[in-house]
Image: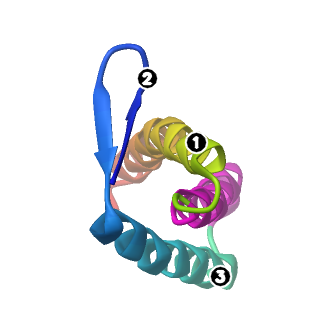
Amino acid sequence: VHTFTNGLTLITIGAQTVTASKAMAVIYADTAEKLKALSVPAELAELHLALINVYLGNAAAMKALATLDDDPASSFAGLLMYKTNTEKEANILSKIEEILTEHVI
């Protein structure tokens, strides 16, 4: 079990988090690959690519988080990357929703 602080919050990471992180890395990478194969309208292409990149970044972040026992600094960097990417993901999905709503899809 390791405990980090981001200046505001204490974050405790244990074996379950490491196991889940490994699984999530695979899921994010697989989802990115599936999105790559998906055709999208031109209006959504830029957001689609951004979402793929976020998911690839999340896969890397989860892999880094899973290295907790060997490299706590990289693991913490992965946690910070994941936090940043989840904010980006929410923004991208919101923009996609706006476009789809405009076109009544």
Q: Identify residue for label 2.
A: 6
Q: Position of residue 101 (x, y in %)?
A: 34, 48
User: Over which residues does the magenta segment extend?
Assistant: 41-67
* Residues at marks 1 and 2, CA–CA distance in whole angstroms: 12 Å
Foreground tag (1 vs 3): 1
As helix, strand or loop, the secondary structure at mark 3 comes to helix
Type of amino acid under label 1: Met
Please identify the quadrant where the N terminus is shown: bottom left
Q: Identify residue for label 3.
A: 33
Give 23 or 74, whichever is nearer the viewer. 74
13 relative to 48 in the view: left or right = left
* Residues at marks 1 and 3, CA–CA distance in whole angstroms: 20 Å
Which dot marks residue 104? none
Give the mark nearer the N terminus: 1 vs 3.
Answer: 3
Q: Position of residue 9 (x, y in %)?
A: 29, 23
As helix, strand or loop, the secondary structure at mark 1 comes to helix
